Amino acid sequence: MVTVGTAKYLFGPRNPIAEDPDLEHAFWAFDHGLGGLLIGILPSLIASKAYDGRERLSVAFRQYVEAGHLDSAASIVKGRARIEKEYGMSADMTARSALSFLFAGIVNTTTTTFWVVLRIFADEKLLAQVRQEVRQALELSSQRTGRDSFSIGVVKETCATLSAVYRESLRVGSENFSVRMIKEDTMLADRYFLKKGAVVQISGGIIHANSAIWGQDVGEFNPHRFLKEKSKGDGFHPAAFRGFGGGKTLCPGRDFATNEILMFVAMIIHGVDLVAPEGGNITVPAKNDRVMPVHVLEPKVNDCPRVIIRPRAEEAETLRRLKVVT
């Protein structure tokens, strides 16, 4: 749902995945084999599934561009295409650029949404807290607009626990690296000498696992650490949270992703129940940390729990009447 919805928002109703739903599988084959592609040696053989998926998507995006479907895309996508045309990029180059933009818009958003939804439904107490916040957000949104509506601004304002689950999911699941080139000899903290021309890698995963920053329960999923940090005002240093990278490479789409994830999760929490088929609590799978961490880590292969999705009749009907507003 997140993959298809994001593609539609960014590239319009005639986007390649909408035209050919099988391209969603091609997209994830491309993503899951990206490490092999980055090696750059005989990619069609070493990473054949990823290579084939990427090429299928590139062809589909070229057809999309040549058919003029960019006219229905989001403003940022049309702006990128306009600049690319001004600089003489071919339709094929524009298509591959569009694919890279879709990749950036989907991989972290989809995976993070999975973890946030699962974490909430796996904990009954946490689910009750978030549901109460979402109900308040719905009521306040409708009061402010005078109609049935759901505002992302109100969700951010009132759903502190939901936001904390989101940030903690990124802390636990994000293993990104920031890479920097040293421009001049530097002594860091009177302890580390960084020589001009050297390359420094900043590991988000190691920082996120540092008990000196996050406390002795650093290995546990505890969203309340972000609520405590906000209430006391004496929490961790802002640079310690690397969910979106940092510095000049801080993710430019972080606000878009945050809005999309929080709004989607809020509607899921309000409108449906997720239950384990055998009863009891939903089991949260371990993350697959044996892959190149190009985005938020997915669960281990074949380790995803089975769940039953049950609509909450009255709440689901309320959602159908709502107009989502910013």
Image (cartoon, helix red, strand yellow):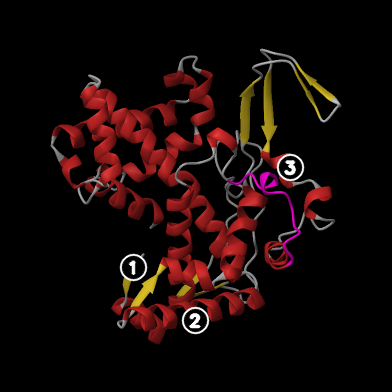
- Magenta-highlighted stretch: main secondary structure? loop
Mark 3 or mark 2, which has the lower sequence index?
A: 2
Check whether the beta carbons of the residues at disc 2 and disc 1 lie within 8 A of each other.
no
Judging from the image, what secondary structure is the residue with disc 2 in?
A: helix
State the residue at coordinates (81%, 58%).
217
Which of 244/55 is in front?
244
Place of residue 169 in the rendered image (x, y in percent of width and height, measured from the top left) = 62, 56
Place of residue 313 in the rendered image (x, y in percent of width and height, measured from the top left) = 39, 84
Marks 3 and 2 sit apart, C-alpha to C-alpha, by 35 Å
Amino acid beneath label 3 = Ile
Q: Residues within 10 Å of mark 3 (few under 14, many from 20)?
A: some
Magenta span = 232-243
Q: Splitting the image into 4 quarters, where does residue 247 fall? A: top right
Mark 3 or mark 1, which has the lower sequence index?
A: 3
Judging from the image, what secondary structure is the residue with disc 3 in?
A: helix
Which residue corresponds to mark 3? 207
Does the magenta portion include 160? no
Amino acid beneath label 2 = Gln
Mark 2 or mark 1, which has the lower sequence index?
A: 2
Marks 2 and 1 sit apart, C-alpha to C-alpha, by 16 Å
Which residue corresponds to mark 1? 325
Which residue corresponds to mark 2? 136
Number of dots carrying numbers: 3
> Which quadrant: the C terminus?
bottom left
Place of residue 66 in the rendered image (x, y in percent of width and height, measured from the top left) = 15, 32
Does the magenta portion include 233? yes
State the residue at coordinates (48%, 24%).
37
Q: Is residue 232 above or below residue 214?
A: below
Q: Splitting the image into 4 quarters, where does residue 154 fall? A: bottom left
Judging from the image, what secondary structure is the residue with disc 1 in?
A: strand
